[in-house]
Amino acid sequence: MTSPNTSKDKALIFLTAICCAVPFLYICYLVNKYAVNVPFWDDWAQIPMINHFLDGNLQLSELWAQHNEHRPLIFRIVRLFFVWTTNWNLVYEMNFSLFLTVLIFVTLLWLVRFTHRPFELKSYAWLLIFIALLNWSPTQFENFLWAQMMCFFFQNIFALLSIIILTTGTHGAWKVIFAAILAALSSYSSGAGLFLWPIGLIVLLVIPANSFNSSCVKWKAVFLRNYSLDIPAP
């Protein structure tokens, strides 16, 4: 016979899951109802790169090139994948952005669970629902209906994963390297990802100094120097 507490816990898990799923399903409905397969604003700037890709004349410099204050290398690679597989149907990119928001939500849930120990769902169910409402709020409709905004979703997921790695468990060499790789991916998704480097530097400075940490600091400096190449002065 099932205990009352077990039944209540299962009911709470079910209700929390439903409350978190509703905002996501509603955004999926809105995106697929109002999405238009037409380039918008900065999408037009990608046309020359896409033409070069289709003609087989794409240069690596086009993937790495600056766009405003960003170098969206990761986004450009993913976009070319969708160009190749969907004949550049932007609606597919918008739905892929929705998939990225699911990864962001799951990562945030993991952070909540790790931060609050011991974790009891009955104490934090409201917080999980609140995160879901913010993550899939219709007020940020432009982020969901503009395929170009995928780069910011990439930036967020890589940044969250990097922070998780740096702030959990022991700081072995492999963790620092992996966090640095994720920081680089975040930086090459959106310019805001560069903020991860000073954050990571602070974490490394807190760890007892050793030769490996010194090498990581130097590697960060080299990365930031290469990122800034050819960026015109304001």
Image (cartoon, grey):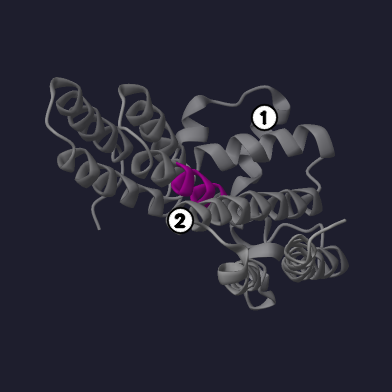
- The quarter of the picture where the N terminus appears is bottom right
Tell me: residue 176, above or below residue 155.
above
In front: label 1 or label 2: 2
The residue under the point 84% across, 57% down is: 2
Q: Is residue 157 magenta?
A: yes
Q: With respect to residue 91, does 63 lie above or below? A: above
Give the image location of residue 102, x and y in percent.
68, 53
Q: Nearer the viewer, residue 56 or 23?
A: 23
Q: Quadrant of residue 125?
A: bottom right
Classed neighbour count for the residue bearing mark 2: other residues with Cα under 10 Å, few (<14), some (14–19), many (≥20): few
Return the residue at label 2: 117
Q: Quadrant of the C terminus?
A: bottom left
What is the three-letter code of the residue carrying label 2? Answer: Arg
Give the residue pinned by disc 1.
53
Q: Residue at x 50, y 26 (%)?
A: 60
Classify residue 48 by image quadrant. Answer: top right
Magenta stretch holds residue 170? no
Residue 112 visible at all? yes
Three-letter code, disc 1: Phe
